[in-house]
Image (tube, rainbow, N blue to C red):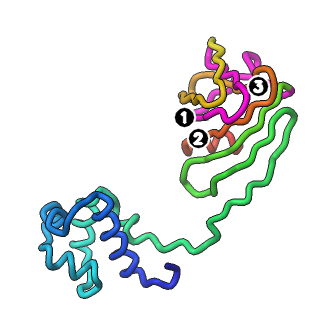
Amino acid sequence: MADLELTDVVRQRVRGLRQARGWSLDALAARCHISPSTLSRIETGHRRIDLEQLVALARALGTTIDHLVEPVDDEDVIIRPMPHQEPGLTTWVLSREGGGPFVAKMRITPERRGGPGHLAVHPGREWFTVITGTALLYLGERQLAVPAGHAAEFSTMVPHSIAAADGPVEILTFFDQEGQRAHAS
């Protein structure tokens, strides 16, 4: 797909989004006020897409023009996380920098300083799921045990900390952009 022209990429995205929604050409045509025959010619490359049509298609498909015309990313899709270690905590960053959510795997051992004396507060939200072990989530005045297979979601404006219960715990954690900025600094 790296060699495709931008117009070909847009056509494929329009067709793909339409089909993913289970819509016929007629159904999309009714939503964007473009005739079914024009839509068919746009999707097959027999007609160029003008800006007015692109706006109508993006709106009808519930996306943005930016998403429809975003260049094809031909960079390596494999992320090779390197461990970042500090006492009691090893972190593998599983996402790329660049505006999306921050995803990391963390291995926390009892040596990590956590708990009521080490609570942090910052803008954003955090989600995590426990892969192995049991995590202790300190959230304000509460201490919550989160066992393997369970997850937690919370506002990071509430004082919080995550620690290991009886032994090592592995979690997969997700931060929004505000949480990512706080954890990266």
Q: Position of residue 184 (x, y in %)?
A: 69, 45
Residue for badge 1: 125
The foreground one among 133 and 155 is 133
Where is residue 50? Give x, y as percent.
25, 79
**Residue interval drawn in magenta:** 111-140
Occupied quadrant, residue 36: bottom left
Q: Are marks 1 and 2 in contact (CB under 8 Å)?
A: yes
Q: Amino acid at mark 2?
A: Phe
Residue at screen point 36% across, 74% down: 12
* Residue 48 part of the magenta segment: no
Looking at the rendered structure, the secondary structure element under dot 1 is strand
Q: Residue at x 54, y 34 (%)?
A: 125
Q: Nearer the viewer, residue 15 or 141?
A: 15
Mark before the other along the chain sequence, 3 or 2: 3
| Mark with earlier residue (1, 2) | 1
Residue shown at 22%/82% (left/top)? 41
Circle 1: residue type: Arg
What element does badge 2 sit on? strand
Residue 84 against residue 116 in the figure, above or below: below
Q: Element under label 3?
A: strand
Q: Which residue is mark 3?
A: 164
- Is 125 included in the stretch rendered in magenta? yes
